[in-house]
Structure formats: structure tokens, C-alpha cells
Amino acid sequence: MICLIMAPGRVATQGTGHLVSMWQINGASNRIYLLGSVHVLRQQDHPIPTAIEKAYEDAEILIMEVDLDDLDPIEMAGMVNELGVIKDGGTLREIMGPSLYDEAADYAAQLDIPFLMLAQTEPWLAAITIEQMMLLRIGFSPEYGIEFYFSAKAGEDHKEILGLETLREQLELLDKLSLPVQRSLLIQTLRESLNIEENLDLLIDAWRYGDIGFLEENLLVEMQRYPELYRTLVVDRNEAWVERIRNLIGEKDDYLIIVGTLHLVGDDGVPALLSEIGITTDQLREPGS
């Protein structure tokens, strides 16, 4: 979860439409759409902008961070247990140290989170678990998120879905973070959970209206406070994805590529990195009324 600041509401000017968090690449023989995702949404956050729906209709193939069609719940649980559960009798308290553990436990008490149930989890997994608990509590669910929404549509429409990474690769990135960064991630997640609903309302508003300035000032600034986290979870992955995207340009199929919105903004974002190698991306707009 990324800490957000207050921003004024955004109102599209009648007849002009508004920007959306999606970019288009025009190849010689195909189009590639880069859609920034909000991984969890509420039912009330639908419908999504029609420009995004049109990109889906145009695309023959979808590419996501992970191919959701290939996820096996039992295999996924096994990987989480393998990578995120502390072995050899160690505890979260020992890993955090007394002072940080007490701070985390205090935040958890304020949030009415049963912190003792995380006693055997590594800090990165504890942070993810807490975030998921808080999101579900206020009505957010992956079921309504962009990836699940389009995965379901693709299944009905028999469109192919590919993944940029495997789930194991994603989990291993988190598991390999240094302990100081993992500790900070857990504390930050707990602290921001105190205002989670307000923060997410602002994030979704900025996402819907393609407010890249807001997203950069709030999403990126907070993440960049932790250089190791930012490099590992954002920059390195963006650089790898750019090469994959470059190889798709000129194919016969049109692609809709869906990744977290954080990956598409700022100087290290995918559109900016594509621009550095001479590939133009255009931010798209919602049609005006």
C-alpha cells in the first residue's frame, strides 16, 4: 500500500473526455496497449472507462504480470508456505527485533488485526497478509480488480492470456529483499492501513482519470524512499518488460498488456523507458460525451 495525499476531485470537461491510465503503441502491423491496473477494486468501481473496454475488444492476446489461468491454488499455497513461513522455530518477533515488533503490534491492535497469527511469517508475507485483510474488510477484492475482470472476459471470448512472470518469480523477489527493507515494508503497511479507505479512493480516482502527476507524486515518491524495494520491484522488472514489449512490435496480433499502474509512471516507467529506445507511446483518452 502506498501513502497518498489529498487531491481535489477530477471532473471531465463535457465534450472533451478525459485521460485514462493506458497508453498505445502503433507498430507497422499491430497495436499494443499498456494498461495500468488497480489489482483490487469494489463492485461500485465498475464500469471502468470505455476506452479500456475498446482496447480489450481490439486485442487478440492479453499479457499480464502473471497468467491467472495457470495459477493452481494448492500449488500457490505451497509456494507461499515454502518462501514465507519462518523455518527452524524462528519467529517474527525475533526477525523484527523487540522495538519494531512492539511498534508493529501496536498498529495491529489499533487496526483490530490478530497479530499473533502472523508469528511464524516473514515480514514481507505478514505485510501482504495484513494488506489483504484490510482490503477485504472494506469491500475491495481481486474479484473486481482489473486482472480478474479481464481474465474472466478473455475466458468467455477464448482470448489467449500470457504472463510476463511466474508467481514463483514474484514471490522470490519479495523473499530476497533484505531484512531491513522487509521490516520497513511491514511497518509502512500497518501505518498506511490506518487510512486505507481514504487512500484507495484517491488512488482509484487518479487512476480512472489518468492523473499521472498525482500518481507520480504519491505512488513513486513513497516507493523511492526505499531504493532497494524500488529497484527490485519496479525498475528491474520494467527494464525486462520493455525488451519483451519491443519484440511484440510488428507482429500481426494486437496486444493488451496489463501491469500495475506504478510500472507505467515516472522516469523509470515503461512508457518512459520505451521512449528512450525510440518507441512512442500515446496516453489515451475516454471519449467525450
Image (tube, rainbow, N blue to C red):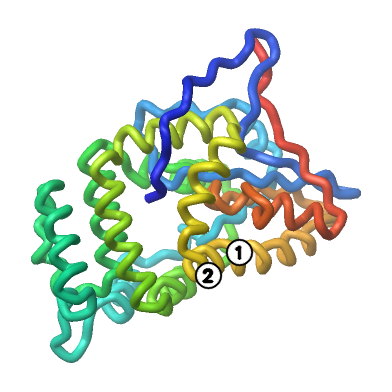
Q: Nearer the viewer, residue 59 or 262?
A: 262
Residue at point 48% right, 48% down?
A: 147
Q: Is residue 91 left or right of residue 147?
A: left
Q: Are marks 1 and 2 in contact (CB under 8 Å)?
A: yes
Judging by the rendered image, the residue that carries numbered circle 1 is 235
Q: Residue furthest bottom?
A: 88
For the C terminus, the image quarter is top right
Residue 18's disc is: none
Q: Position of residue 22 (x, y in %)?
A: 65, 39
Give the residue type that dot 2 points to. Thr
Whether residue 203 can be seen here: yes
Residue at point 79% right, 64% down?
A: 247
Q: Is residue 203 left or right of residue 157?
A: left
Q: Position of residue 27 (x, y in %)?
A: 85, 49
Under circle 1, the secondary element is helix
Residue 232's disc is: 2
Q: Nearer the viewer, residue 256 or 117?
A: 117
Give the residue type that dot 1 points to. Val
Q: Position of residue 12 (x, y in %)?
A: 59, 16
Count residues near mark 2 (Cα–Cα under 10 Å), then give few for <14, some for 14-19, many for 20+.
Answer: some
Under circle 2, the secondary element is helix
